[in-house]
Structures are given as C-alpha cells and as structure tokens.
Image: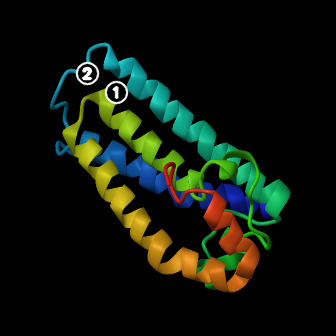
C-alpha cells in the first residue's frame, strides 16, 4: 500500500507542480514561446528529464530506505491517501549532496521545460516555485526535522548543504 500512496502523492503534488502547471501556462496563452532556445532546447529537455529521474530516485529512497512516502509531515490528516514521511532521515543517494534533492528535481523539471519551450512564464514560475520551496523548507520542514531528528539531524545539516552549495 505504501507504493500506491507514493504514486498518488507523486501524481497529485509534483505532477501538479511540475507537470500540470507548466502545461497550463504554455496552453493558456500565458506561457507562449517568448524566445527561441535554439540549441539550448535540448539542454532544457535534458534538465527536465534529469529532474524527473532525480525525483523518482528520491521517492524510491524514501520508500526503500526511509519506509515512507514523499508526503510532508503536515499532510498527516490525509495519510490514508498520501502515506507518511519516512521515520528516519534519508541520507543516501542524492541526499548525500543536498538535503532537498526532491525539491531541486522538481525545480529542474520546471526550468527544463521553460528552456525547452522557450517560455519566460514557465521560467518565472520555476523561480517562484523555488522561492516557495525555500520558505517551506526553512520555516516548516527543517524545524520539524530538528525536533524529530535531534543531534543526528543537526549533524546531517552540518555536513550536507540545504540546496547544493554551503
């Protein structure tokens, strides 16, 4: 059942944020091609695909190593649908390089689409999503994980950057 909940979360949350919203921007007339990416179109596609792959690897680590889904702790009231956060802090895989590779993967998928389709609106949306994620991480997730994980989480924070650079 955990796998099913992880799939439901993936479709509802990153599927909406990195899939439906960019598609809506592109097809609503708000995100029509604003520039010709030329050769960079393929770099955008590679970035989007890397973002999708990164998210899937992180979700798999949550399932296999953490025993939970990517659901954020404040979604507990709907855990019957989305599952619950891992019981341990996942430090393997992409989590060795960033404490938030799942968020970075979603942002990469959005920005990659923005470049691929030559859409300033999608690129700006990706930037806004990153700012929103940053505040969620700093104001909600990290305080929760510090309370839950104690000294081991603090040590993980000391050696692993929040995003990619210390």
Q: Quadrant of residue 34?
A: top left
Front-lying residue, 157 or 51: 157
The answer to whether residue 34 is seen in the rendering is yes
- Tag 1: Cα neighbours inside 10 Å, few (<14), some, or many (≥20)? many
- Which residue corresponds to the image point at 84% horizontal and 55% vertical from the top-left? 64
Where residue 101 appears, x then y in whole percent?
58, 51
Location of the N terminus (image quadrant): bottom right
- Tag 2: Cα neighbours inside 10 Å, few (<14), some, or many (≥20)? some
Indicate whether 53 appears above or below 67: above
- Which residue corresponds to the image point at 38% horizontal and 56% vertical from the top-left? 130
Q: How many marks?
A: 2
Indicate whether 129 appears above or below 45: below
Indicate whether 78 appears above or below 128: below
- Which residue corresponds to the image point at 77% horizontal and 66% vertical from the top-left? 68
Where residue 97 appears, x then y in whole percent?
63, 48
The answer to whether residue 81 is seen in the rendering is no
Q: Quadrant of residue 85?
A: bottom right
What residue sits right under mark 1 in the picture? 116
What residue sits right under mark 2 in the picture? 37
Q: CA gap, disc 1 to disc 2? A: 7 Å
Where residue 128 appears, x then y in whole percent?
30, 57
Query: Left of 65 or right of it: where is 140?
Result: left
- Which residue corresponds to the image point at 44% horizontal and 48% vertical from the top-left? 107
Mark 1 and mark 2 lie on one chain; the one further toward the N terminus is: 2
Disc 2 secondary structure class:
loop
Query: Left of 64 or right of it: where is 22?
Result: left
Labelled disc at residue 14? none
Front-lying residue, 165 or 87: 165
Disc 1 secondary structure class:
helix
Indicate whether 137 appears above or below 25: below
Where residue 22 appears, x then y in whole percent?
34, 45
Residues marked 1 and 2 touching at CB (< 8 Å)? yes
């Amino acid at each position: 059942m955990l796998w099913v909940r992880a799939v439901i979360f993936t479709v509802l949350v990153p599927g909406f944020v990195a899939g439906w919203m960019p598609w809506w921007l592109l097809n609503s007339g708000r995100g029509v091609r604003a520039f010709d990416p030329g050769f960079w179109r393929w770099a955008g596609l590679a970035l989007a695909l890397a973002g999708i792959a990164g998210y899937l690897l992180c979700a798999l680590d949550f399932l296999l190593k953490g025993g939970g889904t990517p659901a954020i702790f404040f979604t507990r009231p709907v855990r019957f649908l989305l599952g619950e956060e891992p019981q341990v802090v996942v430090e393997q895989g992409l989590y060795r390089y960033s404490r938030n590779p799942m968020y970075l993967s979603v942002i990469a998928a959005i920005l990659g689409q923005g470049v691929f389709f030559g859409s300033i609106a999608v690129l700006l949306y990706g930037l806004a999503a990153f700012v929103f994620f940053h505040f969620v991480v700093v104001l909600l997730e990290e305080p929760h994980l510090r309370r839950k994980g104690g000294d081991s989480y603090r040590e993980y924070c000391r050696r692993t950057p929040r995003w990619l650079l210390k």
